[in-house]
Amino acid sequence: MMSSDTPIACSLNAEELPRRLAEIRAIGEDSLLGVDEAGALRFRNDEATRARLEAIVAAESECCSFLAFDLRTSGEALELRITAPQGAEAVADELVAAFQS
């Protein structure tokens, strides 16, 4: 559970952010199958993709601790849901969009 005093800010610096976004785009290009109506990202289900997504989830959980990440197997795919507290939905939407760029 997130406390209400968790800051809604990314802690990555100007050098780290473009690198992270490039990693996210690369995973999307390699493995993204689509996004469902509820905004869940669906990826190819293989060990390499799971490892890459787990690394991104761990890294993003550290720099954007106000976001919640749920990575699970859903049928034949890996499903990633990113949720944000009220007022930070745009940050979650931008992250979802980065996987699709």
Image (spheres, helix red, strand yellow):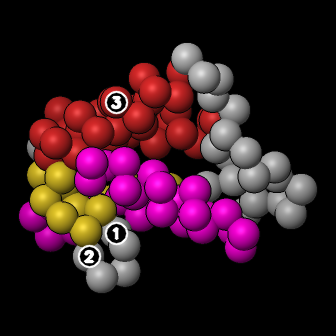
Q: Which residue is mark 3?
A: 22
Alpha carbon separation for disc pair 1 and 3: 20 Å
SS assignment at label 3: helix
The stretch in magenta equals 73-101
Q: Is residue 63 left or right of residue 58?
A: right
Q: Which residue is mark 2?
A: 36
Residue 40 occupies quadrant: bottom left
Amino acid found under the numbered disc labelled 1: Ala
Question: Residue at position x 29%, y 62% from top?
Answer: 41
Q: Position of residue 94 (x, y in %)?
A: 47, 55
Q: Nearer the viewer, mark 1 or mark 3?
A: 3
Q: Which residue is mark 1?
A: 40
Hey, which residue is sitting farthest right in the picture? 5
Question: Residue at position x 23%, y 45% from top?
Answer: 28
Closer to the chain start, of discs 1 and 3, is: 3
Amino acid found under the numbered disc labelled 2: Asp
